[in-house]
Image (cartoon, rainbow, N blue to C red):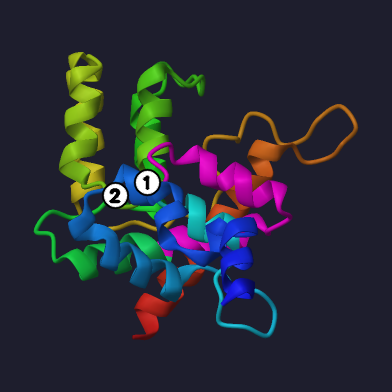
Amino acid sequence: MLLLILFAFFFPQIASPLNFNWWAQHPQKHHEAIKNTIQKCCPKYDGTSKPIFCCADEMFDKAPEFPQQMCKDDNVEMTSVFTTINCAQTEFHRQTGRAHAPTDICRNYCCDFLMNVQGAVKETNCSRKCAMASFAIGKSVNRQLTELRKMGCGAAKTQFAALEDCLKGPAQHFNDIRRSSSKSANDDGEEDEEMAKMRALNEVCRQRAEEEQNS
């Protein structure tokens, strides 16, 4: 008993789900769905069925870019991070039985419609917010669009209508790198971080497309 108490004291994040970040951030009715999603989708420690901590603790953080950075700092491959998000978006939606379609990591390309016009690739606050939402877990496409409208992104009516059609219409799968096409390498000839992320994302989405075609 003493050992259990000491273990809980020194390793509270492992001893109880109450200490995970998502426990306080999300309604209690979703806690079971979150735990099940984490167990199914997170990468595991070698030789165990235990999800790695950065994923179990941060996957459902309300700032989608934060868990990506945390797991990257723990040397988790970006392809593995994106595979986890892809799995979790579908699994959490299934677990909670929500009516509206969830955001989709593989529709990240839709946010290109909110970039600057006239052929530029410069991101705007709208395209960045849209892109971050596509990595979120537990958010619906309708909510994603509502948040963008509140930011005033709907003022660009043609682009916003194209975005909505892209997010809600039939899925498309692109093999080409998007968003980072204007900067493929840094001055040393090495691939920059953003380009590497897009390559990892495309790899995950191409694999998903192949699985869907073969199913």
- Residue sitting at x 64%, y 74%: 3
- Residue sitting at x 35%, y 33%: 130
Task: Tell me if 140 is positioned left or right of 76 in this view.
Answer: left
Callout 1–callout 2 Cβ contact below 8 Å = yes
Residue 150 is situated, as x and y percent measured from the top left of the image, at 19, 19
| 139 inside magenta stretch | no
Residue 21 is situated, as x and y percent measured from the top left of the image, at 44, 47
Residue extending furthest left?
99
Mark 2: which amino acid?
Thr
Q: Secondary structure at mark 1?
A: loop
Q: Nearer the viewer, mark 1 or mark 2?
A: 1
| 67 inside magenta stretch | yes
Residue 192 is situated, as x and y percent measured from the top left of the image, at 74, 36
Between 141 and 34, the one nearer to me in the picture:
34
- Residue sitting at x 55%, y 50%: 176
From the image, tell me which residue sits under label 1.
136
Q: Point out the stretch of residues depicted in magenta.
A: 61-86
Q: Quadrant of the C terminus?
A: bottom left
Task: Tell me if 16 is positioned left or right of 168 in this view.
Answer: right
Q: Main secondary structure of the magenta part?
A: helix
Between 119 and 35, the one nearer to me in the picture:
35
Give residue 76's quadrant in the image: bottom right
The numbered disc on residue 45 is none
Mark pair 1, 2: CA separation:
7 Å
Give residue 14's quadrant in the image: bottom right
